[in-house]
Image: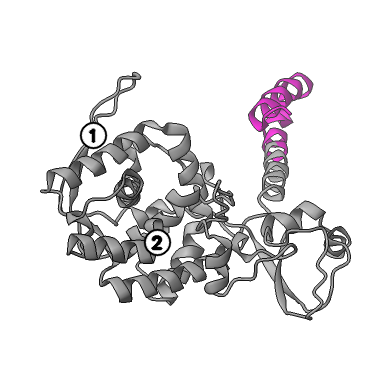
Amino acid sequence: MASRAAWCRYLKKQLIKVNRKYSIPLIAVVCLAVGFISAKVVERYRHYYDKQVNIFTATGNECPGVRWSVPVDSTDVAYAVAVEGDLYFAGERVPLEDQDVRERIERELQIAVYWHSNTLMNMKMANRYFGDIEKILAENGVPSDFKYLALIESNLRNETSPAGAVGFWQLLKETAKIYGLQVDAEVDERYDYQKSTLAACKYLNQAKNELGNWTIAAASYNLGLAGMKDRCADQKTKDYYEMFFNQETSRYLPRMIAMKIIFSNPEKAGFYVKTEDLYQPYSYKTVTVDTAISSIADFAAQYNLKYKHIKILNPWLRDAKLTNKEKKRYEIKILNIN
């Protein structure tokens, strides 16, 4: 479809041929009309979203005391990343003066800065989900920095690990049930990012209470609560930064910290992302269902939606139907498309 400017240029030439006296007023009217139509077309394809938001207006203030460098060049030259200064995770100081700690964080920064496709996609997805996740974390007394835990666990996608961990927070089936989620053939609430965030909050609060600080609680999300208790007993400390771990747990917290640093100043790492480039939060309403749904497709049609529209916002519905023999109450998100 030709652009508005191209249409205006074409019409201008034609109108000048017909009548120079009336061409300018007519061109103005036509251009305004084309602009109005274009705006309507754009609006039609924005109907999935609540509003235009940019997560970096908030994350840009998360690392005020840290200094880090990665020279950005217009060529494809790679530079070493360095970090120093005052840095905190979950309100707890990161000891960058410790060479081992600094090197581990710089390693993760180096990878994330130059893994452009993955980091860019993380930014786009974070813009859609960080707002909701931060709200749930705050309501449950968990520091907002833990949103980066979900980010590194799953890239904010409903992935399934080889071990069977599922969802944004990569919860195993038995763990999910312990923290209040329903997991069966038709309903798996690990795929509900809001409910799984709440389950993760329950675990993190328990881990913090039993281990003593948020940093070690964060690392225990990877190692497991029992496993972390054993390491603390063996090494006679509960300071994550003083402890020795296997490579996966050793890299776990630095990966979160690296993403926090990048999100605090994406331009420094060469990520120039406009608001319109970011995935926006979905616009939806919820309906309560306490009966069976024999066909998700028919249910969707009641709201002038397609099957995929229900599945996109409700991935926890794992089948094409909902038997609901126990008459449980479920909140189903209905996408706003008008």
Residue ID for mark 1: 81
x and y, in percent, of residue 209 in the image:
32, 76
Give the residue displayed 53% in from the left and 56% down from the top: 168
Circle 2: is it few (<14), some (14-19), or many (20+) Cα within 10 Å? some
> Is 127 displayed left or right of 80 in the figure?
right
Between 126 and 210, the one lying in front of the other is 210
Query: Within the image, what quadrant is residue 114 found in?
Result: top left
Q: Secondary structure at mark 1?
A: loop
Which SS type dominates the magenta stretch?
helix
Residue ID for mark 2: 224
Magenta region includes residue 6: yes
x and y, in percent, of residue 226 in the image:
37, 66
For the N terminus, which image quadrant? top right
Residue 170 visible? The answer is: yes
**Which range of residues does the magenta coloring cover?**
1-30
> Is 314 displayed left or right of 62 in the figure?
right
Query: Within the image, what quadrant is residue 167 found in?
Result: bottom right
Between 170 and 312, the one lying in front of the other is 170
Name above or below for residue 307 compared with residue 273. Answer: below
